[in-house]
Image (cartoon, helix red, strand yellow):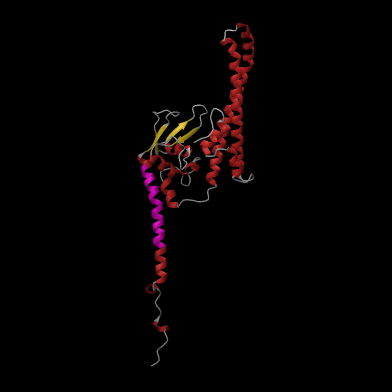
């Protein structure tokens, strides 16, 4: 469950939804500051801080503007002229703050995408080649968003959709995207929204656009093509493992079986003494 209120800390809320960390600054402690992921984590944390600070400023400015209108609401006409004069200054200020807030939001979403991209490139464990072929056989290589389906992210997303209840959401306030499972919780194992977007574009998933993005969220389901790719991905790794096992067993048994050893030339055998 996301611990942050999006109305008070939208930056921290977005980072928790997108990267699964409650404190954005925790990203800075996972890698050295000189490493690409360390620098990217710092950018994410700073962008989240800036968005949260701007949210606080916008809220304060809006509350002050509302306070200026209270005499009007109470029918105190003597204060109307003063309130109007102050509002002429307050409203443009709120507009500037909102514009800065929008820019901060864009900066944060871009920094999160960059962090995810670097994270996918830093993965050490690579899947078997046959598995990768099974996952990407229906896709065009060389796309800019290939990082979203690298390693086992595509398989994990397809399996999460098959399990049922996975929904695609967009925040009605800040516009960021996120996923929820059948219980309304963050998917576990994690599924990236960018991965789902890529699979929808590739025709492997169907997104029910007849439902609202905010509530209840748009339900995701496998297309026939997605079902085919999922089956191929699941069977690829067992086939590779079985083939390697048979190959190793044959090599070991061949070395141990005397019948498979090269025959000795009889002409080289020492003659028996009679």
Q: Is residue 11 left or right of residue 264?
A: right
Number of callouts in the render?
Answer: 0
Q: For the view shown, which residue lies furthest in the bottom direction?
A: 274
Q: Position of residue 136 (x, y in %)?
A: 43, 45
Residue found 36% across the figure and 44% down from its top: 228
Q: Position of residue 101 (x, y in %)?
A: 59, 27
Q: For the view shown, which residue lies furthest in the top direction?
A: 77
- Residue 235, magenta (yes or no): yes
Secondary structure predominantly adopted by residues drawn in magenta:
helix
Which residue occupies the foreground of this view, 29 or 118?
29
Q: Is residue 16 visible?
A: yes
Q: Is residue 90 left or right of residue 172?
A: right
- Residue 169, magenta (yes or no): no
Q: Quadrant of the C terminus?
A: bottom left
Q: Is residue 158 left or right of residue 58?
A: left
Q: Position of residue 172 (x, y in %)?
A: 49, 27
Q: Is residue 40 visible?
A: no
Q: Position of residue 186 (x, y in %)?
A: 47, 37
Q: Which residues are magenta?
A: 227-247
Which residue occupies the foreground of this view, 252 or 29?
29
Vertical side of 48 occupied by 267: above or below:
below
Q: For the view shown, which residue lies furthest in the left direction?
A: 224
Which residue occupies the foreground of this view, 186 or 252?
186
Vertical side of 253 occupied by 12: above or below:
above
Vertical side of 196 occupied by 71: above or below:
above
Residue found 41% across the figure and 55% down from its top: 240
């Amino acid at each position: 469950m996301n611990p942050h209120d999006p109305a008070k800390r939208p930056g921290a809320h977005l980072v928790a939804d997108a990267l699964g960390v409650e404190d954005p600054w925790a990203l800075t402690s996972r890698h050295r500051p000189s490493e690409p992921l360390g620098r990217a984590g710092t950018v994410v944390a700073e962008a989240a801080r800036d968005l949260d600070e701007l949210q606080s400023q916008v809220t304060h400015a809006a509350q002050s503007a509302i306070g200026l209108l209270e005499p009007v609401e109470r029918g105190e006409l003597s204060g109307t002229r003063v309130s109007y004069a102050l509002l002429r200054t307050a409203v443009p200020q709120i507009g500037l703050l909102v514009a800065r807030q929008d820019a901060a939001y864009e900066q944060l979403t871009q920094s999160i995408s960059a962090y995810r991209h670097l994270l996918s490139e830093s993965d050490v464990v690579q899947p078997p080649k046959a598995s990768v072929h099974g996952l990407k056989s229906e896709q065009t290589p060389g796309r800019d968003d290939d990082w979203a389906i690298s390693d086992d992210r595509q398989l994990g997303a397809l399996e999460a959709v098959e399990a049922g209840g996975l929904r695609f959401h967009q925040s009605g306030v800040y516009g960021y995207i996120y996923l929820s499972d059948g219980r309304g919780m963050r998917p576990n194992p994690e599924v990236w929204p960018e991965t789902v977007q890529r699979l929808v574009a590739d025709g492997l998933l169907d997104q029910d656009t007849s439902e609202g993005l905010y509530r209840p969220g748009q339900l995701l389901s496998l297309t026939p093509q997605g079902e085919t790719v999922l089956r191929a991905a699941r069977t690829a790794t067992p086939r590779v493992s079985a083939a390697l096992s048979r190959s190793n067993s044959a090599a070991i048994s061949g070395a141990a079986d005397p019948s498979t050893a090269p025959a000795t030339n009889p002409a080289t055998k020492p003659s028996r003494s009679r």
